[in-house]
Structures are given as C-alpha cells and as structure tokens.
Amino acid sequence: MRKQNDRSIADEPDSVEDIIAELVDNNEPVTSSGLAELTDLNAEEAKLFFRTWDRIETKRRRMIVNRLIELMEDRVELNFDAIFKHCLKDTDEVVRRGAIEGLWENEEASFIQPLIDMMEQDSSVGVRKEAAIALGRFAELAEHGRLSAEYKDRLSWALLAAVDDKSNPAEVRRRALEAVAPLSLQRVRQAIMEAYRSGDTRQKTSAVYAMGKNCDIAWLRILLEELASDSAELRYEAAIACGELGEEEAVPRLIGLTEDYDKEVQLVAVQALGRIGGSEAREHVELCLSHSSGAVRQIAEQALYELETMTEPASAPWIGYRGRG
C-alpha cells in the first residue's frame, strides 16, 4: 500500500494506474520518479501493466526497459522483476535482451527453463547469447549446492547440448561453454579442452575463460603457458583465470604482466595478484601503488583493500570484457 500524507490532492504523486496510462502517451515524459513507482507491482497493477505494454511503441518500450535497469543499479531497493519477466516475451529483441539483463540478480529456479527456451529457440542470436550468459549464474548456484540435482542436470544437459550442436551460431556455443564451466563434471572439462584445441581463436579464448570458472587446478599448466601468449586476449583471459584458481605458482608470471604493453592485461594482472594473495603478490601490489598508470594505481588500491579486509574476492568484478565480445 502506498503512503499517503497531508499534502493537497494537487501535490499527490500520480497513482500507479496513472503512470502506466502515461507510458502509452508519447507526449508524456518518462520520468525516473514515475518509473520508480512501478516497483513491486501487486497482482492487479501487474495485470494493468501487461495489458498496456503492447500498446507502447517499440522505441519507447526499449527506453523504458533501459531506464528501469538504470534505476535498479542506482537504487537497490527497487524490484521490477514482474515487468522484466513479462518483457521476456516481447516482440522486440532489444527489449527481450534488456529483460534478461534486468533479471540478472534473480535466482529463482523457475527462471531457468525460460532462459533455456530462449537460448535454444529465440529468433535473435543476440537474445540466445544473452540467455546462455544468464544461465551461467545458475550453473554457479548448482555447483555450490544451492539448486536441486534436477535443476543441475537440466542445466548441464541444455548447456552442453548447445555447445555440441555445431548448427548453433558460434557466439551461442561459446557463451554456453562459458556458462556451463562452473560445473565440475567430466563432460564439462572435455568440452573445455575440445574448444581449446579447436583451432578457432574465439573458441580458444572462451575455453581459457572457462578454465578459470571451472576452478580445476589441472588447468594451471595451460593457463601459465597462455600468460605468455602472443595474443593479448588470451593473456587477458589467462590472467583472470589464474586469479580464479588462486594458485601462488602463477604469481611470478602475473607480476610480469603488470608491465604488459596492453593496458587491460596490466589491470587484470594486478587484480589477479590481489585475489591470489600471499606475501610476494601483496608486495608487488603495494609497488603498483606508485605505478605510472593511474588506472593501475586505482586497481592496486582496490586489491589491497580486499586483502586487508579479507573481502570475498568475487565481490570485485573483473575489469572489462574483452576477448569474449
């Protein structure tokens, strides 16, 4: 129930019904304050929104979805899941992709099958790719025992099938491999190795990323080799993967990468040292506080903060997304 106060009727904020009605009118501005009122819609409000949504022109629907995502990033108390779930079936692929992004923190197991369906059947390769990426967080939940065995099996089957299906677009296969990587299954490890040996640069890059998500120390030898790759993309992904594995054996080579000619490789190398920890890694991260690059100095400060506060490493996202774009 929305709060009432002693202000005059003229000063009262629009009702949810009024805000929804205004969304259809191109002459009415879409305001952040109005959209914020669409948080946690009750059943009747949701029905009204769903009836209204298809009457809004495509360009405006796209804009609304983007604004809702921005609002959620700025105000964590807002919840537009009901809206985003409805938008998963929108006729516009940009809206559907935005809906998947908007549901990024949704961990409801009931969301898994719709994502699988979108990965397998959506008419847009971009939507299929985003659905595969989104399934990755559920693979992590399954690996940590936060989903039932039934859902874990459903995830692994669907994602591995997408990887194996050579009729799938390459981007969908790559994202499916990255998504299934957290599952500690022999078939997953086999799929990663097959991609690594495929001869395709993009598949190999995804495989190196997947090695880090798989968190199996057996990948360390390959990752150490890739830290010296001629490809900046592979060095970048290998540095991240070494940070995920957390093995101190990688520290000397990561120290070398903090002076890599590629700036993004420098940054993730410092991050990886911060995640691995240990005296040698910590000492070099401290040295990076006086690095010539301001970006490296900033990342070094963040890495030291995590080391000193024992913050969960995964709380800090890796810099950039190069190599898998």
Image (cartoon, rainbow, N blue to C red):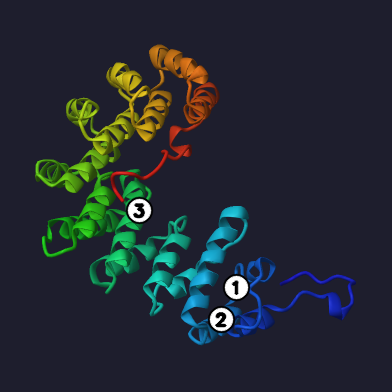
Q: Nearer the viewer, mark 3 or mark 2?
A: 2
Could you tell me if residue 290 is visible in this image?
A: yes
The disc labelled 2 sits on which kind of residue? Phe
Residue at x 48% of width, y 72% of height: 62
The number of numbered discs placed on residues in the rendered structure image is 3
Identify residue type, mark 3.
Phe
Q: Residues within 10 Å of mark 1 (few under 14, many from 20)?
A: some
Residue at the location (36% across, 22% down)? 259
Question: Quick check: marks 1 and 3 in contact, CB under 8 Å?
Answer: no
Along the line of sight, the residue nearer the viewer: 117 or 90: 90
Q: Which residue is mark 3?
A: 138
Q: Which element type, helix, strand or loop, lies under badge 2?
A: helix
Residue type pointed to by label 1: Leu
Q: Which mark is residue 136?
A: none
Q: Which circle's residue, 1 or 3, is located before the other in the chain?
A: 1
Q: Earlier in the sequence, mark 2 or mark 1?
A: 1
Residue at mark 1: 41
Mark-to-mark CA distance, 3 and 2: 29 Å
- 129 and 307: which is toward the camera: 129
Identify the secondary structure beneath mark 1: loop
Lateral position of residue 216 relative to residue 108, left or right: left
